[in-house]
Image (cartoon, helix red, strand yellow):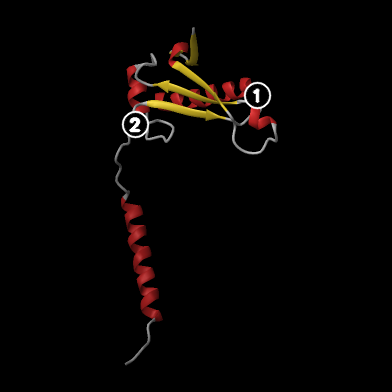
Amino acid sequence: MTVQIAPGIELNDDALQWQAIRAQGAGGQNVNKVSSALHLRVDINNSGLPEAVCQRLLQLGDSRITSDGIIVIKAQRFRTQEKNRADALERLRDLIVAAGKTQKARRATKPTKASQRRRMDSKAKHGQLKRLRRNVDD
């Protein structure tokens, strides 16, 4: 079975490793006995994602990606495992889609002559104003 991430990008279901853990924070006695939070681990290199997406994920510098190339997402926002599982998958989907987008190439541009002239006029005017503020000792 596969998980649909984006059009043309699927993730093998066996690449997802789920681990139930106890949630942090307030919750009364229930939080001490129910493991409703989840850790989702995905090995980028063995995930079945396209090579270009894998390379961009490894270069992201995201704190959720370890140096070994494993994405770790901790989902504990909700009180049920099902909702936390859906939340973790959605956050994983967002991360992979963001890595799948290619950035538009930046083209170097030059400022126009008019903008250069305006900048120099502004600097001259500011300098003149500062000169007028000085004490006259003559």
Instruction: Please tell me in which quadrant of the rendered image residue 58 appears.
Output: top left
- The picture places residue 55, in percent across and down from the top left corner, at 32, 24
Q: Residue at horizontal 65%, vertical 27%?
A: 33
Give the spatial CA distance, label 2 vs label 1.
30 Å
Q: Residue at horizontal 34%, vertical 31%?
A: 67
Determine whether, in the image, residue 45 is placed left or right of residue 41: left
Nearer to us in this view, 138 or 25? 25
Q: Confirm or deny contact between disc 2 and disc 1 (CB under 8 A).
A: no
Amino acid residing under circle 2: Ser
Mark toward the start of the polypeptide (2 vs 1): 2
Amino acid residing under circle 1: Thr
Which label belongs to residue 80?
A: 1
Q: Residue furthest bottom?
A: 138
Instruction: Please tell me in which quadrant of the rendered image residue 90 appears.
Output: top right
Nearer to us in this view, 25 or 56? 25
Which label belongs to residue 8?
A: none
- Label 2: which secondary element: loop
Question: Badge 1: how crowded within 10 Å, few (<14), some, or many (20+)?
Answer: some
Rendered-image quadrant of the C terminus: bottom left
Which label belongs to residue 67?
A: 2
- The picture places residue 68, in percent across and down from the top left corner, at 34, 27
Question: Badge 2: how crowded within 10 Å, few (<14), some, or many (20+)?
Answer: few
Q: Residue at horizontal 32%, vertical 49%?
A: 112
Instruction: Please tell me in which quadrant of the rendered image residue 65 appears.
Output: top left
Q: Residue at horizontal 39%, vertical 16%?
A: 47
- The picture places residue 73, in percent across and down from the top left corner, at 49, 28
- Label 1: which secondary element: loop
Nearer to us in this view, 112 or 20? 20
Determine whether, in the image, residue 32 is placed left or right of residue 123: right
Determine whether, in the image, residue 109 is placed left or right of residue 89: left
**Count of numbered marks:** 2
Nearer to us in this view, 34 or 15? 34
